[in-house]
Amino acid sequence: MTVDSSPETQPAPPRQSSLATAAARNLATTTKSAPQMQEITSRWLLRMLPWVETKGGTYRVNRRLTYAVGDGVIEFVQDGASVRVIPRELGELAMLRGFDDEDALRELASRCVQRDFRPGEVIVERGAPAQHIHLIAHGRVGHTSVGKYGDTVDLAVLGDGDRFGEHALLDGQGTWDYTATAETAGTLLTLSRADFDAVLAASPALQDHITRFSSLPQQRQNRHGEAEIAMSAGHTGEPELPGTFVDYELRPREYELSIAQTVLRVHTRVADLYNEPMNQTEEQLRLTIEALRERQEHELVNNREFGLLHNAAFKQRIQTHSGPPTPDDLDELLCRRRGTRLFLAHPRTIAAIGREFNARGLYPDHVDVGGQSVPAWRGVPILPCNKIPISRENTSSIIAMRTGEENQGVIGLRQTGLPEEYEPGLSVRFMGIDEKSIISYLVTAYYSAAVLVPDALGVLENVQIARRRD
C-alpha cells in the first residue's frame, strides 16, 4: 500500500497553549551574582601591617648613629661562561666602602680570578693560611667548623653575591676559622693578598683609604654597630662616672608615599539605564579598587625603593641549609629578631613547608588570625602572599617580620583625610564627562612601608619549592 506523504496530507503541529520559556526569559529578572574577579586574594600583608598616619607625605626614620662599613651584595657581569665583578661593586667590601678611585677599583677587579666549583668541593680548609678573598657569583657555599665536643657544626650558608675571607687581604698571618664546602655547582672570583698588595703599593689614594679604615675600630660600638652609650655598673664608692650622649644619624632615611592610580570610565548610558538591581558605577568602582589594592600589596613586597624583599638588611637575609624550607630554617629565621609577628610566603612555598614538616612527622599548630585558622610555627602564623615571586629555578623567599611603631618593627604608611576619600588612603575624584558621554573618575591610592630597625625584617632566600623525587 502506498502512503501519500505530500505536505497537504501532513498533520498540523499542535497549537501553543502557553508562553514559551525562551520568550519568558526575555521578560524575567534572573537571579544573578555581583561581578566576580579571580585576581582578588586574601591580601594578608595589607591586613596585618599597622598603618601609620603620614602627614606631609613623608616619614622619617630616626636612628642611633650606626657605623656602616659595607655589608651589601656584590653584583657581577656574565659574558657567556666568563664572569667578572663590576669594579664599583667592590665598594661593598668593608675595607673599600666609600672608596671611589675608578682606576684602582678597575685594577682590583681585573685581578679577580674566576673559579668554577662542583658540589662537595672543599674551597678552603679550616686552619689553612687565609690568602684570598672569595666572591660568590653563583651557587651555595656552606661553612662548617668543629664544635666544643669535637663534632662538626654548621655555621652559615652563603649564596649569590656573598663573600668570605675579607680579613685575608689585610691580615698577613690570618688563618681560616672554618671549612667552606660547595653545596651546589657554581662560580666564584678570588682576589689574592699578593694582588691586593700590588695595587695598594701603586695607589696612594687606596693607601690613604685603608689607613682611615683601619682607624675605624677605635670608635666604640655595640654589637649592632651603633655608637656606644658609655656607662658604669657594679662600682662601689664614689668613682667618677662617665659622661655620655646618644648620637643620631645625621642623614636619616625618609620614606615618601608612593602612588597607584587609574582612570575609571563609565558611559552615561550604562550609568543611567542599567542600574537595576545593581548599581553599575558602584560595581565598576568596586572591582577597580580591588585591582588597585592588589597592585598596592605587590608594590609593598617588590618595589625596589620600599618593598620588603629589597629593603631587608643584608645581615637579615639567610640561606636555606639544604634547599627546601625545613623547621630548622624557620627557627633560624625566627631567632634573628624578637617578637616575630608573622611569616609571609607564597602558597606554593607553604605547601613545600608542609611537605618538609610531614616528612619529619611534625604537624604545625594552627592559630586564630582575624577569625581564621591559619598554620603556624612556634606560635607565629604562616600567611599566604602570592606577590612573593617564584624564580625560574622554582625558588622563592619567606619573609618574617615584627610589626608596629611601639615594637620598632615594620609599618605601613598612608595619609587619610584626602579630598573625596573613598577608603582610608584611597580617593575617587570625579573628572567630568567628555563629548562622547564618558564619565571619568580618578582612583588613587597612596602608600609605602618603613622598616624602623634592621632586625625587624628578615628573609629566607632561595627556598626550593619544587617537589623532590624520592
Image (cartoon, grey):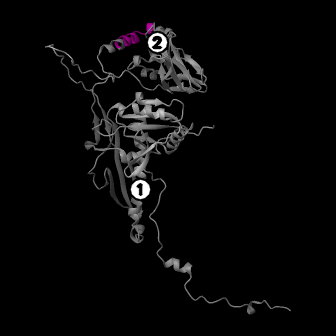
Q: Main secondary structure of the magenta part?
A: helix
Would you name the residue on which mark 2 appears?
168
Marked residue nearer the N-terminal end (1 or 2): 2
- Depth check: 204 or 57 in front? 57
* 157 left or right of 225 in image: right
- The image shows residue 275 at horizontal and vertical percentages of 40, 69
Q: Which three-letter amino acid code belongs to the residue tagged 1?
A: Thr
Which residue corresponds to the image point at 33% horizontal and 12% vertical from the top-left?
A: 215
Please say if 103 is above or below 257.
above
- Depth check: 58 or 65 in front? 65
Would you name the residue on which mark 1 appears?
288
Is residue 302 a member of the stretch shown in magenta? no
- Around disc 2, counting alpha carbons within 10 Å, would you say few (fewer than 14), some (14 to 19), or many (20 or more)? many
Measured in 3D between alpha carbons, the distance from the residue under mark 1 to the one under mark 2, in whole angstroms, is 57 Å
The magenta stretch spans which residues? 200-212
Quarter assignment of residue 322: top right
- Mark sitting on residue 336: none
- The image shows residue 71 at horizontal and vertical percentages of 41, 24
In this view of the protein, can residue 208 be seen by the observer?
Answer: yes
Q: Which three-letter amino acid code belongs to the residue tagged 2?
A: Ala
Label 2 SS: helix
Label 1 SS: helix
